[in-house]
Image (cartoon, rainbow, N blue to C red):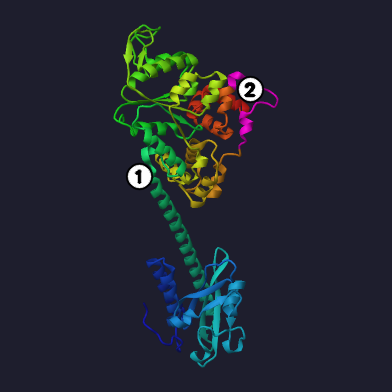
Amino acid sequence: MPPHRNDPDTPGTDWHAQELLLMREVMKLVGRSLAPAFVLREMLHLMSELLGLNRGRMVLADEAVPGAERTASIRHAYGLTAEEAARGVFRWGEGITGRVLASGLPAIVQDVDAEPLFLFRTVARAQLPPQTVAFIALPIEVNGATVGVLACHRIRSRQRHLNDDLALLRILTTLAGQLLQLEQLVAEERRQLAARNEALERALDVGSARYGLIGRSPALLQALGELERVSQSQATVLLLGESGTGKELFARAVHLASGRRDQPFIKVNCSAIPDTLFESELFGYERGAFTGASTARAGWFEQAHRGTIFLDEIGELPLAMQSKLLRTLQEGTLVRLGGTREIRIDVRLVAATNRDLAREVQAGGFRQDLYYRLNVIPIRLPSLRERREDVRALALHFVSRANQAHQRNVHLAPDALARLEAHDWPGNIRELGNLIERLVLLADHTLVTAAALERFMPEAWAPQAAAEPPHGQPLPASNVRDYLSGRSHSPQALQDALLRHHGSQTLAAQSLGLTLRQFGYRLKKAGLR
């Protein structure tokens, strides 16, 4: 810090050297700290000590209050007492300072005694030097908007030219604006980081991720509560709900919460097994049972012995297999294809479907006795529309997983998370997860705002366009089951699945939990065939 100078305006003063010294000292301050408060206060100090620009003050806009007049207050000052600075509050357009705030134009008062608009609000005239006192006020701008005023007093009769002071003050106001803009950017980044950390903490909270199920909404907790109450029993559990609601995770949760947690958990997607292979896949086969059966093989039920078997999309089982499944569930035995020996098994069954099995029974597509056997403990899984409180945690979970999988560093701004929460998600958790993965791969910037998110959001979707038959025509019997579950996937979701699997309808259908027939039917109805 340069030595104190009571009067820099002495004969022979090298003003150019003083300006250079001031700028050098200010830039040193900026290099040591980007905190505007520290730099701006010292700037006002140097203006007084080196150039005789006294009682400098930085007047900055106050936080806006709805319905109240805009005001600005002295935030930083040099040469003013705390009491004097506290009086420095100005309405927009009030006095010289207020006029600069309102107009965004500099103001130069050659003689404060001769200017009616000069308020003497902070310092009474009697406290100022007896000489003619000038007042200079320049606007401070951030992003083209006036956010404050840099002002000071100046003895009018000086050896230094007024234009030189103005030139230097313009440089200092520009620097002040840049420091304030940087402060705003840092504050916004901190707010976003704080919001992101808070959301991550919620997502990672042990209480909100039981059995890998993320969320703490009442609808989810109710389903989890029902699950835990029946987990220790041996009764069959039937998981009901729309496609994409997380049935496999719930099935695993039943297994993990039961006494079978250390035994096998076998998942079988019934929609992915051709009709001719159901029996051999579920119940196994003996050597020589069919051409190519060179060795015996245990089926999925045998492999799940003492554990849990999860039959996903159980509504896809052919009628012939439904009767064999019923016998296995009732008797606890099975016979391999091509065999004669009964094999005893101890298996807990969890089944899932997105169809209305009661209506399937009425339509003749599902056995009534098997339906009653499965429907011992039905648990309805809530759609994502019923779990809006969980969307934020789920989105952050999917972002973290996609970032790791694809080595990206994408984050969601608070307004983007709010936009995701407001969406209805007809495809449920699966649709949200697919959108997040697409966003992580294709986002142009690391931080995704609501505006940037909009191009990834699914198009508005009318359920009747994908599910309802033509007016006046009955739905063919072969498509009854497609109709019952035809409200689950938007055209955008179908297209996305095809893109992810390079045009393979079989793989795309499996990724959406559909049969190939269902997938093709929906493509046709959506006009995408």
Q: Nearer the viewer, residue 362 or 151?
A: 362
Specify the amino acid type for callout 2. Leu
Q: Earlier in the sequence, mark 1 or mark 2?
A: 1
Q: Position of residue 144 (x, y in %)?
A: 57, 64
Q: Nearer the viewer, residue 60 or 24?
A: 60
The furthest residue to the right? 472
Question: Is 149 drawn above or below residue 116 in the view shown?
Answer: above
Q: Position of residue 512 (x, y in %)?
A: 50, 30
Q: Is residue 466 magenta?
A: yes
Q: Which residue is mark 1?
A: 206
Q: Position of residue 139 (x, y in %)?
A: 56, 72
Question: Is 196 drawn above or below residue 13 in the view shown?
Answer: above
Q: Is residue 13 left or right of residue 333?
A: right
Task: Name the quarter where the N terminus is drawn.
Answer: bottom left
Q: Which residue is mark 2?
A: 475
The furthest residue to the left? 262
Residue 352 visible to an observer of this rendering: yes
Query: Residue at point 40% right, 39% down?
Result: 225
Specify the amino acid type for callout 1. Val
User: Which stretch did the figure color magenta?
Assistant: 461-479
Q: In the rendered structure, are the residues bearing label 1 and label 2 in contact, judged by CB atoms less than 8 Å apart?
A: no
